[in-house]
Amino acid sequence: MDCGGVFVKYVLFIFNILFVICGILLIIFGSLMVSEIKHFSDVDETFTANSVAIIILVLGCLIFLVSFLGCCGAIRENSCGLTMYSIVMLGLFLCQIALIIYVWVNHVQIRQSLDVVVQKIWDQRKSSDGILMDSLQRSLKCCGLHGFADYGTTYPASCCDSPNNGYCSLTSVMFRPGCKSAVDSLWDTNANIIKYAGLGVLAVELVAFIFACCLANQTRNNLRRQNY
């Protein structure tokens, strides 16, 4: 293999190490999103938010697994493995484009869906003993629907870190945001990470796809020359 082929081989190997890191980060990020919204699992309107988190988690696992295929194909100079890697990488590339476009286009709609979820949890807090609302307030460090004033003058223990006799004091809840704004802030932050970090991952994947195709083609050509 000439110098150009060796260069492509090791650059592809380095890219796949980056993919392993990206895959791990996506798995962690997707898991964090799932853990943040797990308290909504009993409400139908959360399907959209859950689906985004699950897609991220699945993509992270796929990228992590495919990276090993790319590493093995590059180091062993296996044209079949490199071709398979290129096809799978192209599929992942297209899936991530679809995910980013979906989040970008439906960002507001997803946030509105989450607002409906929070409103329903707030409305059902008395009939369900407030379990979902308490879980939401503890996980997001919020209090009430729009703020602590929604509870009047008695604040539940889930609104603060150190309740006294099952209730929180005014000073411990007055700086906590309402749960609707806390959920909106959580989604806005996660959506920006999905969009802008995803674009960076797409650029790396595109370069790796091109390099894998070139290396696979050069490996096949070398095998043909050896047969003559």
Image (cartoon, rainbow, N blue to C red):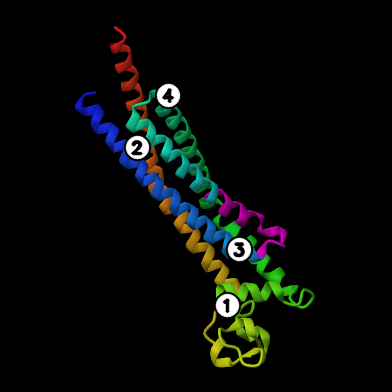
Identity, as a three-letter code, of the amino acid under mark 2: Val
Residue 227 vs residue 131, the one in the foreground: 227
Q: Secondary structure at mark 4?
A: helix
Q: Are marks 2 and 3 in contact (CB under 8 Å)?
A: no
N-terminal of the pair, mark 4 or mark 2, is 4
Marks 4 and 2, Cα distance to the nearest angstrom?
19 Å
Identity, as a three-letter code, of the amino acid under mark 1: Cys
Up-down relation of residue 112 to residue 93 (above or below): below
Q: Position of residue 213 (x, y in %)?
A: 37, 27
For mark 1, does the 10 Å Cα neighbourhood hold few (<14), some (14 to 19), or many (20 or more) residues? Answer: many
Which residue is identified by label 2?
207
Q: Secondary structure at mark 3?
A: helix
- Identify the mark at residue 142; answer none if there is no mark: 1
For mark 2, does the 10 Å Cα neighbourhood hold few (<14), some (14 to 19), or many (20 or more) residues? Answer: few
Q: Which residues are magenta?
A: 40-56
- Identify the mark at residue 80; answer none if there is no mark: 4
N-terminal of the pair, mark 3 or mark 1, is 3
N-terminal of the pair, mark 2 or mark 3, is 3
Q: Is residue 195 visible?
A: no
Which residue is identified by label 3?
37
Residue at position x 66%, y 59% in the image: 46
Q: Position of residue 26 (x, y in %)?
A: 47, 52
For mark 3, does the 10 Å Cα neighbourhood hold few (<14), some (14 to 19), or many (20 or more) residues? Answer: some
Marks 1 and 2, Cα distance to the nearest angstrom?
43 Å
N-terminal of the pair, mark 4 or mark 1, is 4
User: In screen coordinates, is 72 left or right of 60?
Assistant: left
